[in-house]
């Protein structure tokens, strides 16, 4: 049985909804946006400040002052999220969405999942579920995918969506949300 499930997802693939439904089915705790809320509390920042830099790759300075160990705000947020994810994983029965949790918990037996869908499906979800303007929806989708890919690659040194890294890659556009949840539930119970 997998007591930890980590989900990386393309924007508009429905990864959060699938994780939410799966958590209910398994009776697991879900860690997604709640990690951002907890990060806000611990760092004394607003939700807008943290969510704007959440899953952001820090820009590394070309030159650092000698003896400077100053971390960027993005690095501080990431380090706080790592702490929160590790603390949450002290108790089995967790599903983590994004934030490179599969790498953070690589010492645990995790089911590492990547959720994707074709661009038309994701674009439709971007407009109808996420409520993005039609003329901006594709740009939003590309922006989030690029941000997530860069963040994942930076913190894991692995390729985002790689079949060599993930245990399972599923296409939610082809399977549908219910089938994805059923599949993941069955795998988690093995």
Image: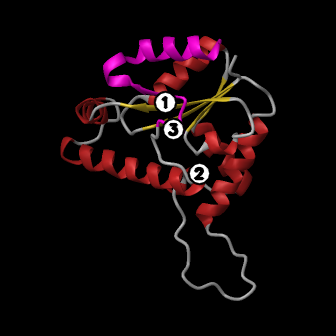
- Position of residue 14 relative to residue 8, above or below, is above
The residue at 75%/39% (across/down) is: 107
Magenta region: which residues? 163-190
Q: Residues within 10 Å of mark 1 (few under 14, many from 20)?
A: many
- How many numbered circles does the render carry? 3
Which is nearer the eye, 61 or 140? 61
Q: Residue at x 62, y 69 (%)?
A: 72
Residue at the far bottom: name it: 66
Provide the residue designation for mark 1: 16
Q: Which mark is residue 176?
A: none
Is residue 103 on the magenta stretch? no
Q: Residue at x 73, y 52 (%)?
A: 42
Q: Position of residue 58 (x, y in %)?
A: 54, 65
For residue 30, above or below residue 25: below
Q: Circle 2 is placed at which residue position?
A: 156
Task: Report the mark closest to the observer, 3 or 1.
Answer: 3
**How has the structure been colored for display?**
secondary structure
Find disc 3 in the rendering and name its residue: 164
Residue located at (63% from left, 84% from top):
64
Mark 3 or mark 1: which comes first in sequence?
1
> Is residue 185 shown in magenta?
yes
Residue 166 on image: x %, y %: 53, 34
């Amino acid at each position: 049985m997998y007591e930890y499930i980590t989900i990386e997802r393309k924007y508009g693939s429905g990864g959060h909804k699938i994780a939410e439904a799966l958590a209910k089915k398994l009776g697991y705790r879900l860690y997604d946006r709640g990690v951002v809320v907890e990060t806000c509390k611990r760092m004394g920042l607003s939700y807008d400040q943290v969510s704007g830099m959440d899953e952001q790759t820090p820009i590394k300075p070309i030159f650092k002052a000698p003896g400077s160990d100053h971390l960027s705000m993005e690095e501080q947020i990431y380090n706080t999220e790592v702490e929160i994810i590790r603390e949450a994983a002290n108790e089995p029965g967790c599903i983590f969405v994004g934030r490179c949790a599969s790498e953070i918990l690589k010492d645990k037996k995790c089911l590492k999942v990547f959720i994707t869908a074709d661009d038309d499906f994701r674009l439709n979800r971007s407009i109808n579920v996420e409520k993005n303007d039609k003329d901006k929806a594709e740009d939003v989708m590309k922006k989030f995918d690029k941000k997530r890919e860069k963040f994942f690659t930076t913190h894991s040194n692995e390729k985002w969506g790689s079949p060599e890294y993930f245990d399972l890659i599923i296409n939610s556009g082809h399977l549908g949300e219910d089938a994805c949840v059923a599949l993941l539930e069955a795998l988690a119970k093995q």
